[in-house]
Image: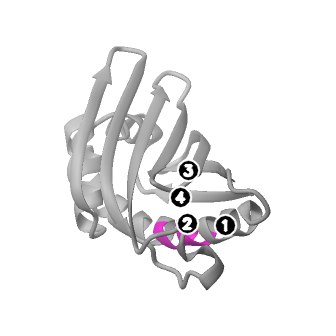
Amino acid sequence: MKFHEQSRYPFPADTVIQVFADKDYFLEKYRLSGAGNIQLLEDARDADHSRIVTQRDVDIDIDVPAFARKFVPDVVTLIQTDAWDLARKTGRLNIRFQGVPAEVHCDMTLTGHDDHALLDLRFSVQVRVPMVGDKLAGLLARDLKTKFERDARHAEQVMGKIADRYR
């Protein structure tokens, strides 16, 4: 299943890309969103690229039908990788779900527009379960959209604090 989302940030794209390469941004955003057991697994950055890998426990925010209950627990551990080409302002986000046969891949593009930046996200949700995989992918996509909307509010709040480091 594929879907598309966008976020707008009230900062220049050159500032936002630096924030997206800062581990503190992710750790604080996840804390505010209610995630548990937040861990930084990797933080690598050079002049051209960044890669941040985190792990966290999140609640599933949607009602899961009975057929999917054995595949989707109430709380799931996510391992998320955010990798950016800082000069091109393009990135890739990958999410693995521990104990759930699903993956999320997302191509990200950040563009500057006068006084703000626009983050374009193109998601793909894949579930490796015969016969019900597409239905499960739809459920996970709905849950991701719910989290994305909630996290966007926290992201802007945290970005406001961290952006000062890069202006």
Which residue position holds label 4?
7
Disc on the earlier residue, 3 or 4: 4
Element carrying mark 4? strand
Q: Residue at x 52, y 81 (%)?
A: 62
Which residue position holds label 1?
136
Query: Which residues lie in the magenta part?
Result: 142-147
Which residue position holds label 2?
71
Q: CA distance from mark 4 to mark 1?
A: 25 Å
Contact flag, marks 2 and 1 (Cβ < 8 Å): yes
Relative height, residue 45 to residue 57 (above, below): above
Which residue position holds label 3?
118
Q: CA distance from mark 4 to mark 2?
A: 30 Å
Q: Main secondary structure of the magenta part?
A: helix
Circle 4 residues within 10 Å: few <14, some 14–19, many ≥20:
some
Q: Amino acid at mark 4?
A: Ser
Res. 136 visible in picture: yes
